[in-house]
Image: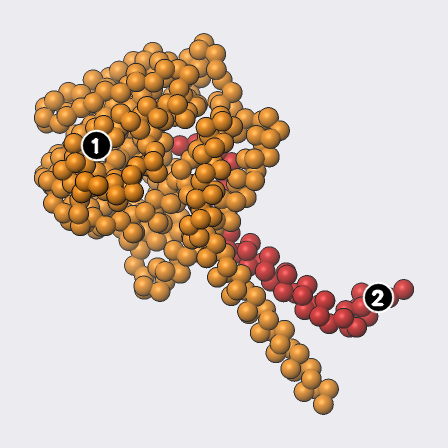
Chain colours: A orange, B red
Amino acid sequence: MDTTRGTATSTLVALSLVATVAATAVAVDLLSRFRPLADRIQARDLARFVRGEEFFPNRGNFIEFEDRLLVDEIPNADYSHGGVYFFGASDLKWALATWELPAEEQPFVGNYGVGALSHVFELQFLRFLIEDEHLLEAGGDKTRIILGVSWSNAVSWAPEAYFGPLWRRHGLYTYTADGGIHQASQSRFGRWLRTERAHCSGFIGGGFNRLARGLMTGLGLPLEAADAIKDPAEISAWVRTHTHLPEASVEKQVRAFDDLLAYLQAQGVGVTVVFLPHRRAFDELPLVGVYHDEVTRICRARSVETVDLTHALSEDEFWDMGHPNYRGLQKTNAALMQVAAPHLARIAPRP
Amino acid sequence: MVSPDDFLRRHPRVLLLAVIALACVATILLLSTSTGPVVLYQRF
């Protein structure tokens, strides 16, 4: 009798444990995808940005902007109707406020910025989107590529510094420096499982991250040392000491930029190149000017339209050394969407 | 003085709830792990 009762209790405990694990996983997953909660979190993050309390990284319910892009946005993108897609490094991804676009335009605009993106990586990213994900499914005439460029694209980041591990992070993609980016080979169930796990880890990790950032800013501590630098002389000194831009790197990335334009033109897609805003202190670096001139020369040679926003922001419209604050974001977003407007008018249905 | 073992033997539901709570926390911690860095400030 006691043995039977003991077995029943053990079974109950075991089943309770299994049910708890399953219910917790399902609850976290549902919460991570619950739109009203995501909207509230975004509204809170934005309000803190507007008040100048914290930078807004536009990451949704993930830890980083790129997690949202790679796990959520790209796999769910519909390229069959065309669109305008922005590419660039962090200064591009944080120069757009796509959440402010009218709902009917949002499916036609992609903010495909990736941090620490050299032109070598940018070419790999575009080749993946065009050859594997069919970015140009609607045809080159219905798709516009806008390349946001700046000196940071001329830095030859090591593939394993950020770009490679980023793509491999959730097991959804593979990346090698020579082979580029591809979807990871796995069953549909395996892909679904990894996607949901990425949603869960992003939601929980993002929550911890927000808590830590809230505590730091609540104590009046800057999240990044450079955030506290406001004096022009100190900014110049920071730029001189922290910008590593060897001549060979600029030459390599300028060649990669030429290859990128050649590739896109061979695909029959229209390209616009936008020079993104930077602080005046970067003008003091000769190689920043060399990069600007070389990119301009290549665009002219290839008859590619350029828009120069290099000095579109005043010094007090930057949050840190390279990214706009809320006021600056309003300006960069308006300028970039103005570049996109004639193409959107052609592609997106009018309301 | 009642030992913890005696207490849990007399109140098996408390034991069960404690185990369930632990399982819940362990699941959340497992779900939160990823190969990505949980950095305070995204540098780029």
Compare residues A205 and A296 and report the one nearer the observer. A205
Please identify the residue farthest to the bottom as the structure is shown: A1
Find disc 2 in the rendering and name its residue. B3
Asked if A193 appears above or below A286 in the picture, the reply is: below
Which element is circle 2 on?
loop
In the rendered image, residue A314, in percent from the top left (x then y), is placed at 36, 15
> What chain does mark 2 sit on?
B
Q: Nearer the viewer, mark 1 or mark 2?
A: 1
Residue at x 44% of width, y 11% of height: A232
Residue at x 51% of width, y 24% of height: A225
Compare residues A200 and A34 and report the one nearer the observer. A34
The local crowd at label 2, few if under 14, some if 14 to 19, many if 20 or more residues have their Cα within 10 Å, is: few
In the rendered image, residue A148, in percent from the top left (x then y), is placed at 26, 29
Say how many tags the image has.
2
Q: Marks 1 and 2, Cα distance to the nearest angstrom?
A: 72 Å
Asked if A24 appears above or below A204 in the picture, the reply is: below
Which picture quadrant has residue B22? bottom right
> What chain does mark 1 sit on?
A
